[in-house]
Image (cartoon, helix red, strand yellow):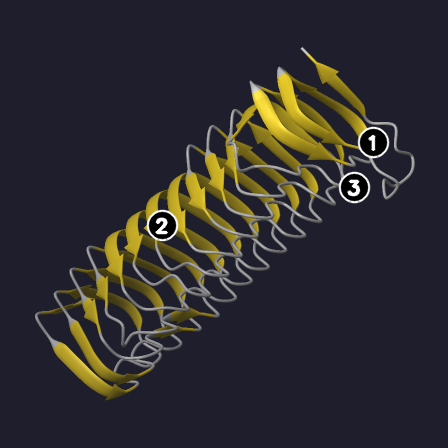
Amino acid sequence: MRIIENAEFGGERPLYCQTGLHLKNVCIHAGESALKETADIVAEDCRFEGKYPFWCCRGFSLSNCHFTEGARAALWYSRDCSMVNSLVEAPKMFREMDGVSLTSVRLTDALETLWSCRHIDIRDVQADRGDYIFMHSSDIRIHNLTLHGNYSFQYCRNVEIRNSNLQSKDAFWESENVTVYDSVLNGEYLGWYSKNLTLVNCHIGGTQPLCYAEGLVLENCSFAEDADLAFEYSTLKASIKGSITSVKNPRSGRIEAASYGEIILDSNIKAPADCQIITL
C-alpha cells in the first residue's frame, strides 16, 4: 500500500482511479471527485473540503477525519465503507451505498443522508439537522444513535435500533420489519402506515402516534402526555406501562394499559372494529 503523508490536493480528480493508498494528514481542497473510482483506501487524520471525494469506490476506511461543509455528497455509489471518530459537517452523505459502518461519528448537518443504502451498522453516532435521514434504506443495525431531524426512516426495511434517542416527526412512515428497543421516540405522527413495527421498552411522545399501522407490537412501552389520539385504524398488540392520554378507533387487536384518559370509538371506526381495550 502506497503511503501519502502531509500532502495537499485540489482541483478535479487528483487521485482518480487509484488503488491501495494510505492517506495520512492529507487535505483535499476545493474541487471535485478527488478519489473517484478508487479501491482499498485508508485515510487517517485527513480533511476533505471539496465535493464528491468518494464516488464509485470499493473498500475504504476513514478515521479521525473531517468533512467540511464544502464536501457535500461525499460518499455515493460505493461499497464497504468504515468511518470512526470523525466529524461530518457536510449534508447529503452516503447514497446508494452497500456496506456502511459508522462508529463514534458526529454529523452536524445530516440532511438527506444515508439514502437507498444497504447493510448499515451505526454505533455511538450523533446526527443533527437530519431531515429525511435513512430514506429507502434497508438492513440497518443501530446502537446508541442520537437523532434530531424529521421524516426519518421513511420506507426503510429490516431495521433494528437499540438504546437510542430519536427526536423526529413522521418517523418510520411506510417502514417494514422494524424493531426498536430501550429508546425514546419523540415526534408527531410516529409510524404511520408501517408494517410489522415492534417497540420494546420504549417511551413515546408526540400527537397521533402509530396510526394506520399493520402488525404493530408494543411491549412494556410508556406514553408521554402529548401522545394522544393513538392507534387510529391500526391492527396491534400493545402492552402499555402506565396511562395513555387517548386511544382513537383502533381497528383490531388488543391494548392493555393501567388507565386511559379517553377512549374514542365513533362511527368512523373501520371493520372489523374488534380491538380489545383492557384496563390492567
The answer to which quarter of the image holds residue 9 is bottom left
Circle nearer the N terminus (2, 3): 2
Which residue is at the front of the view, 232 or 90?
Answer: 232
Q: Identify the residue position indicated by label 1 in the image.
A: 252
Q: Identify the residue position indicated by label 3 in the image.
A: 233
Q: Is residue 84 left or right of residue 116?
A: left
Look at label 2 and name its amino acid.
Answer: Leu
Circle nearer the N terminus (1, 3): 3
**66 vs 178: above or below:** below
Q: Are marks 2 and 1 in contact (CB under 8 Å)?
A: no
- Does the rendering let one see residue 89? yes
**226 vs 131: above or below:** above
Residue depth check, mark 2 versus mark 3: number of the one nearer the observer: 3
Which residue is at the front of the view, 88 or 130?
Answer: 130
Look at label 1 and name its amino acid.
Answer: Ser
Q: Are marks 1 and 3 in contact (CB under 8 Å)?
A: no
- Residue at the image point whose x is 63% and y is 27% from the top: 218
Q: Which mark is residue 95?
A: none
- Residue at the image point whose x is 53% and y is 59% from the top: 117
Look at label 3 and name its amino acid.
Answer: Tyr
Q: Is residue 267 left or right of residue 84?
A: right
Q: Position of residue 119 (x, y in %)?
A: 52, 50
Residue depth check, mark 2 versus mark 1: number of the one nearer the observer: 1
- Does the rendering let one see residue 1? no
Q: Marks 2/1: CA distance?
A: 39 Å
* Number of residues whose C-alpha sits closer than 10 Å to that of mark 3, classed few (under 14), some (14–19) or many (20 or more): many
- Residue at the image point whose x is 61% and y is 37% from the top: 228
Q: Position of residue 50 (x, y in %)?
A: 26, 79
Please, what secondary structure does the residue beneath circle 1 have? Answer: strand
Please, what secondary structure does the residue beneath circle 3 have? Answer: loop
Q: Identify the residue position indicated by label 2 in the image.
A: 102
